[in-house]
Amino acid sequence: AQSVTQLDSQVPVFEEAPVELRCNYSSSVSVYLFWYVQYPNQGLQLLLKYLSGSTLVKGINGFEAEFNKSQTSFHLRKPSVHISDTAEYFCAVTPMNRDDKIIFGKGTRLHILP
Amino acid sequence: NAGVMQNPRHLVRRRGQEARLRCSPMKGHSHVYWYRQLPEEGLKFMVYLQKENIIDESGMPKERFSAEFPKEGPSILRIQQVVRGDSAAYFCASSPRGTGRGYGYTFGSGTRLTVV
């Protein structure tokens, strides 16, 4: 079975400052990794995903994430945040090469301070 | 190209009534997943369906909850005899193939169920 831990439930950051949202996962098999974003009263949108290859993955809205197999981590970063980045961010995992569900972390709320 | 359509967006039911939540996947998507979201708890998997088949219902409560995805028409999540604890946001997602090939989900906007 797979599990995801998002280490921070809330992260406050000043506008135009950099941000890192942390994610660790646990799995006995190889996995695909995802980050989704949820704006208030909306569904989730895919930000980026790691399937294979380069460990640095670039997504939409200037976000990127780095897969670290030895640390079992997939942290999300943005060099300069904007007020419009205020949202909840979910890290997620699913096993490779097997049709299964995606398991989500509990989410991190990103608060952008003016 | 319409996305995943869920209706209704908001649903209010009295305790003991039935709730029916509908989900039409994206065109060409044959895999449907239902999740429940409660504050501070993230998304909890409920059920994974393909056309006319339940693939994984390990997250569904054993009683009062059922799901279907018929050959024609939307997927339905049905909650019988609702209780206050069923109040939550219910999200449907779809994918064109199974997640084992690296496909992520496309989510609907959710149905917010309130039981009074």
Image: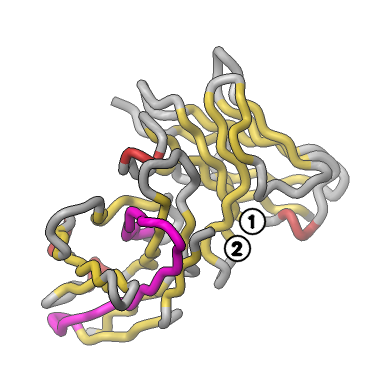
Q: Residue furthest front?
A: A28
Q: On screen, A50 above or below A17?
A: above
Q: How far apart are the alpha carbons under marks 2 and 1?
A: 6 Å
Q: Quadrant of residue A18?
A: bottom left
Looking at this view, is A9 or A29 the one in front? A29
User: Tag 2: Cα neighbours inside 10 Å, few (<14), some, or many (≥20)?
Assistant: some
Visible residue check, residue B106:
no
The quadrant of the image that shows the N terminus of chain A is bottom right
Give the secondary structure at mark 1: strand
Q: Position of residue A35 (x, y in %)?
A: 32, 60
Image side of residue B16 versus residue B55, left or right:
right
The quadrant of the image that shows the C terminus of chain A is bottom left
Q: On screen, A36 above or below B4?
A: below
Q: Pointer 1: what residue?
A: B88
Q: Position of residue A89 (x, y in %)?
A: 36, 66
Give the secondary structure at mark 2: strand
The numbered dot on residue B38 is 2
Magenta stretch: give its range.
A15-38
Q: Which chain's residue wears label 1?
A: B
Residue at the image position 30 percent from the left and 51 percent from the top: A46
